[in-house]
Amino acid sequence: MNRVNLYIAFASWLFATVSLGSAENFQNRPVLSELNEMVEQATMCGYAINERDLVVSRSQNFFPYCGYGQSYFASLQTELEYLPTLYVDHVNGPVNESTNGFRFFTLLTWREAAGLNANGFRRTITQGDNTYGLAQAGDIIGSWLYEDIEAGFSALKWTKWLYYTANGQQKMGSGTQCSCEAAYEECCNNYEAYAWQNTPSTIYRVAAYSCFSVGGWYHWSTERVRQNPPPEICSLPSIPRCIDIYFNIVPFVEYDFFDFDDLGFIDFGFFLYDTTGQFSETTYSMDYIGSDTNPFLLANWTCPMVERSGGFIVSELGLLAKWSFAY
């Protein structure tokens, strides 16, 4: 159905169904200019919610619609109340209280962020009588319907993007000898000789430890996991956005935290690593994470030995997509 026919059809049932008692801007049966405005507003609301469905992989389509106007608005309101838990809370977040992921809206926190009543969307059944809930047959159609729907979708801004490629590769080395220097040299040589092995389950890891065991043995061990090639964020819709890239940093066994590659982290948790500029392409290639260098060399851990351990794992990439919607 093209835009002109859409307007004609929409105007026809609005003229037939809008109550003579419509309040606010539409207190009497609407004239043509008011009908045009109502068509524009209602159409824009549908397009806006379709956009917000698209970025969370939902496929709801409100066009073409038929029947009573109230059922159309109720379908938009129903979808709006489904979406908040799929959107990151940009007011109280984006990181949750446990600092291990994003904070998502609840229905109540979304209503608060949107400036809606805690009981839901405004309804007017009879002139001067306001209640809350989804639009129903017989309700008066007025500007409050558009205002609440627009406030609702305008509060949905950010999502967690799930799709990226991972190309993990692992490299390690260890040495155990009766002198610190011999064990250290063996570990470094083994690390350099070790061929990178595929390990798709880990995004990034760097770890090292040194210890002195009973019997007079010195032990050095080092390893890392890299992404080569770097992760590619993929399957994006063509809606413009920028993406904040978070790392979920967790301990490697019982090692102390240590940032060998100087990535800028100070402890375990869920932290911002990088951000992109705005782009519309459907893929984005991240920069190389860290380095390939033996962690001991980066930290200048050498003999004489000090018993210690350090490192961390990036268990997850948290991709926060900040959308620039058309509506």
Image (cartoon, grey):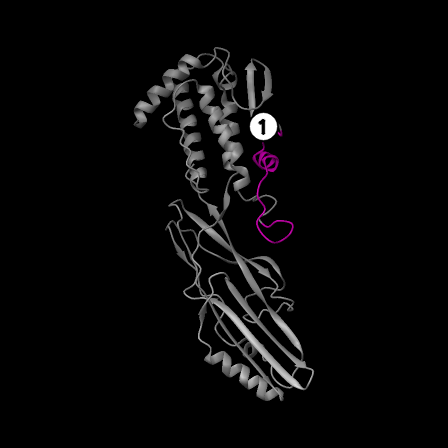
Amino acid on which the number 1 mark rests in the picture: Gly
Residue 39, quarter of picture: top left
Q: Which residue is mark 1?
A: 120
Figure check: 135 above or below 243: above
Q: Nearer the viewer, residue 212 or 91?
A: 212
Direction from residue 238 to residue 145 in the image, left or right: right
Figure check: 66 above or below 50: above
Is residue 98 highlighted in magenta? yes
Q: Nearer the viewer, residue 168 or 47?
A: 168
**Element assignment for label 1:** loop
- Residue 124 placed where, x, y %? 55, 17
Is residue 9 highlighted in magenta? no
Magenta residues span: 95-118
Quarter of the rendering occupied by the C terminus: top left
Please name the predominant secondary structure of the magenta segment in the image: loop
- Residue 67 placed where, x, y %? 41, 18
Q: Give the crowd class for mark 1: few <14, some 14-19, many >=20 residues within 10 Å.
A: some
Q: Residue at x 51, y 28 (%)?
A: 147
